[in-house]
Amino acid sequence: MAFRIYTKTGDQGETGLFGGQRLSKDDLRIEAYGTIDELNASVGSLADEVLSAEIKDILRLIQHDLFVIGSHLATMPGKNLSLPPLPEAQIQVMESLMDLWDETLPPLKNFILPGGHSTVSKAHLARCICRRAERRTISLSRREKISPQIVVYLNRLSDFFFMLGRKLALDLGVTEIIWEPRK
């Protein structure tokens, strides 16, 4: 018999973690790694629009990192499963890229609004989803042991998406939309 995507094991509102434990689908742990999955889909959508092969490659690496982070969040603490290592070195890579891009971007003197081009908007959408994933992971870390590297990675990644949005605007020749309070 062929493998089927539906198992019917979640029909009662529970899902399984790596290691076999079952949790309610609205459990904080499921919410945390589910938001990582949502972020990964958002990054894939962004990568599909980006014209630069270099940036597309970086985004695909980030997708792999997010899959690793999701696997760690989908495993109960104390389970001795063979998981890929967390992408700690990638944090420095993101910081180096942001520093490099910052040298070419106009100084930031105002808040900017997401928009101006669909690719720029998708970078900002990924930033927002990343911030939510970070919040969910922090909430989970107050209840259970979570590697602090996951929170650091997500915090840096949201900054990365902000800077990427600015870089994409520059590369696309799009004027950033300055937020100005209404009078």
Image: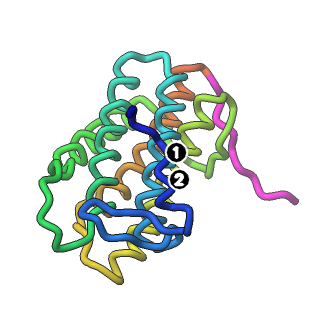
How has the structure been colored for display? rainbow
Can you identify the residue that label 1 sits on?
126
**8, 64: nearer the viewer:** 8
What element does badge 2 sit on? helix
What residue is at 57 percent from the left and 48 percent from the top?
A: 109
What residue is shown at x 38% (from left), y 16% (from top)? 53
Q: Which mark is residue 63?
A: none
Q: Position of residue 73 (x, y in %)?
A: 32, 62
Q: Are marks 1 and 2 in contact (CB under 8 Å)?
A: yes
Q: Amino acid at mark 2?
A: Ile
Question: Is residue 106 on the magenta stretch?
Answer: no
Label 1 – label 2 distance at C-alpha: 5 Å
Give the residue furthest to the bottom: 143
The image shows residue 182, relative to residue 144, as above or below, that is above
Amino acid type, residue under disc 1 in the picture: Ala
Vertical position of residue 37 compared to residue 61: above or below: below
* Farthest-out residue, right: 183
Q: Is residue 176 magenta?
A: yes
Q: Nearer the viewer, residue 39 or 117?
A: 39
Q: Is residue 22 left or right of residue 161?
A: left
Magenta stretch: give its range: 174-183
Horizontal placement of 132 versus 157: left or right? right
Mark 2, residue position: 129
In this orientation, which residue lies closer to the viewer: 70 or 131? 70
Residue 22 locus on image (x, y percent): 38, 70
> Could you tell me which residue is drawn at 36 percent across and 38 percent down?
63
| x and y, in percent, of residue 154 in the image | 36, 56
